[in-house]
Image (cartoon, helix red, strand yellow):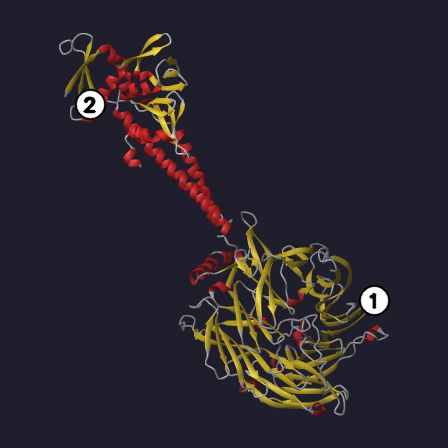
Amino acid sequence: MTVLGWIVFSLFSVSAAYFVYQLAKDIIWNRKLKVFQKSVGESVVKRPVMFWIKRSYGAAVASLFMFATVFSGSFSIPNMLGDRVLLHAKSLSSAQELRELLSSQSNGYLNWWFRDFVTFTDAVPEANMGAEDQVDASQELERDFIGTNNQVEGVEEADIIKTDGDMIYYAARYQNVIRILSIGDGGVATLEADLELGDVYTDSIFLTDEYLVVIGYSYEMTPYAYDVEYDYVGWAYTAYTGTVIVYDRETLEIAYQLETDSNFYQYRLINDALFLVSNKQTNQEEVRPMLKETEGELDEVTSYVDYDDIYYFDNVPIYGMTVFTGIDLNTFDVNSQAFLGYVNQIYADDDSLYTAFSYTEYFQYTEAQIGWVEKTQIMKFDIDTTNATFNYVGQAVLDGYIENQYWMDEYDDHLRIVTTSWNPIQNRLYVLKQSETTDELIIVGSIENGLGKPNERVYSVDFQGTTGYVVTFEQIDPRYWIDLSDPTDPKILKATERPGFSTYLHIWNEEGTQVVGFGYSADQNGRINGMEIIASNDDLGVEDSYVLTYQDQLGIWSYSYSEASYNPKAMMISPDHGIVAFPVMSWSYQEVAPDNYQSNYVSQYLVFYIDFTQEDPDNIISEPIVIRHEASAYYFGIDRGVYISETGDQAFEMIYTLSVTGMVSYNLETKAIFQTINFELPDWAKE
Amino acid sequence: MIKIIWNREDFEKIQDDIAGQFNLTITTDPNEVPEHKVGILLNEDNQESIQAFVEKLMLSSYQIFFPTPDGYLQVQVKTVTYLEAFGDEIYMHFDKQESQLIRQPLYQLEEKLKPYHFIRIGKSFIVNITKIRYIRTSFNAKLGLELIDGTHLEVSRSFVKTFKDALGILKKED
């Protein structure tokens, strides 16, 4: 309670005590009077009830105020986090409270909340649209490369491949190994090492000047009992161990290792500060998130996140525990906080981190009907990239859900976010700003109507400064230009339409007038007929497109698919280099005899040049360079490609493509395959 | 059992008043009591009840003469609620909202009425304790009194101790 609260409480307490004392005296005096009068034979005059009610009034009112002071919470010391009053987030005090909260959700509220289920594979490198290409401009070695397709410049996102122009690190899928290749003179690649990770499955990697950071997990499986009736022995994942291993790049020795009892699934690296989001299972005996650290040769240190560093919200469903961890890669200092709830997507720039949790809320619509609406909780954290620390700032719950991180963007301390919903189909744009005093994100501007025609939902979003781009789709793809120069009054500037829709937009120039989109083409009826890359120049009102058409002719049926359609980090994209490239899996089926089809799988990596200066708009997108890997199954297909070039005496310009089976490099100058390296395959992949 | 022989006319005046207060057996049997008298039978085991009843009988019949501007006035003590002084003038108030100017100093009246449960409660007031409906304690250590006729009086701070003493609660309270 505040000092003022204590003063008020004391005053009411003293008053109540005084009135009670007076009342007691009254009772005693009048009882004595009654005894006296009786003793002298006088008939005792009965005191009216109202007298006692009146005499009790003061004591009753003062007591009421006294209790109201305490229980109303008006004078409670506000729940503070730094200099911010927590109106929404509440911190825990004990394991008991945590268990009760989890229990209440699983027993009752779970029926009324639904999470957009995110599978573990969804959590692997997720879509990245509108990212900045990373060009290492400081190369005195005259090496140049295209790095991971990041959303925000300076905020590194994890991927299964990383390069600094000199080395390529590739976390091969389905294998607990990192392939390390050096790029030597003339662009010649050499397989330097296979870094075996033991029982750790790689999820993503990061690269710093000094370290290779591997983020992964291991798990233990516990067999179910053999069930005679069903003739079945099942297995169940019991415990994931989220793991961060920091390798010294020179020695490949482990410099630092962090093991937790939660799964890491969202991460950002900013200035050697690694921020990780993980999900902890809450059915374990120890409900606090565990951190087990090993630094160099030092002994293992185990710690737990304190209960008062675990927060929850009354109005948001609790599906589990989300743990935020910051690791300073210079000192290996670790900070952790946890929230009861879930996080689907994160957005980060160099001083803020936003999380989004989309869920479905159910309510009794009529006596017989259950209604539902989609909601998204946004949380904001201030981040300090010098010490890898973060502070919870505030939250807001919005209507609708978001599908990926590109639907969020911060500009000039305002978060712009686009949501869409099924029930009813409605697309919205919100502009949020943090409160100065409380943990609230305040909606300062919004567009509730006009985004999308009836029945159209949002498919892709990008922001460039004060302009937002939103693509909606049902049968045709309107792309909306939104003026966000006044955060409190966002306006739809215009909309253009074309068949199909983009799942990813990449703003090509600073003015935002040149846009490259990746998605699906469709006919005028909305029927999808292939994957498509488009390049539109709004300045000139021209557009070029390239469609990877589905074929169904002469007994051959084929189709293509690319991971880039849902994960833009599979895409190598750089306006500076004028390059868009991505892996494509193609299948064709030929009917060689009635009801007898012969299938053929081809793994390709397509490299397009984008040149908006071309006079003929049809030439903006070049014909693709096609690089193929020998692959007998889709899971051996090309995962990623890397562009590295060097000028000077040993000049080269190369695309290195990597798959489970090996590395194939392509010389962009000679337009020919330059080198092939076959990787040692695990036994299961040799057949 | 003890028997009290009392004037029948006097007894009839208080009969309604004491109904239910005391466990009495009344007899007017000429073989047991003289004419115009009444026999009152009390259980001698309850000494307190007997004492209270006797006091009630006595008080009901006490009559005192008071000097007034118009001569002496015979007053039945039990009908007086309180006395009030305005300088030299003393007003005696009765339970039927009547009052009478008395020509006698208040201190003398205090002494005169003390045996009949009258007590000084201020420089200008004497109150009949048996006429108090209830006592109200207050912030300033004074006592408020409400009499059965609705009159409100105040026990001055310097007379509170005496008042308590009269009620017999001084030792327990202080």
Q: Quadrant of residue A113?
A: bottom right
Front residue of A575/A297: it is A297
The quarter holding residue B130 reads top left
Q: Amino acid at mark 1?
A: Gly
Left or right of A213 in this view: A131: right
Q: Is residue A181 left or right of residue B104?
A: right
Whole-percent x, y for residue A171 in the image: 59, 81
Q: Compared with residue A577, is residue B115 higher up or lower down, i.e. above or below?
A: above
Give the image location of residue B118, x and y in percent: 31, 22
Can the viewer see residue A257 in this picture?
A: yes
Residue under label 1: A541
Read off the residue under disc 2: B50
Return the residue nearer the eye: A438 or B97.
Answer: B97
Secondary structure at badge 2 equals helix
Q: Quadrant of the C terminus of chain A?
A: bottom right
| Residue found at x 78% / y 62% | A496
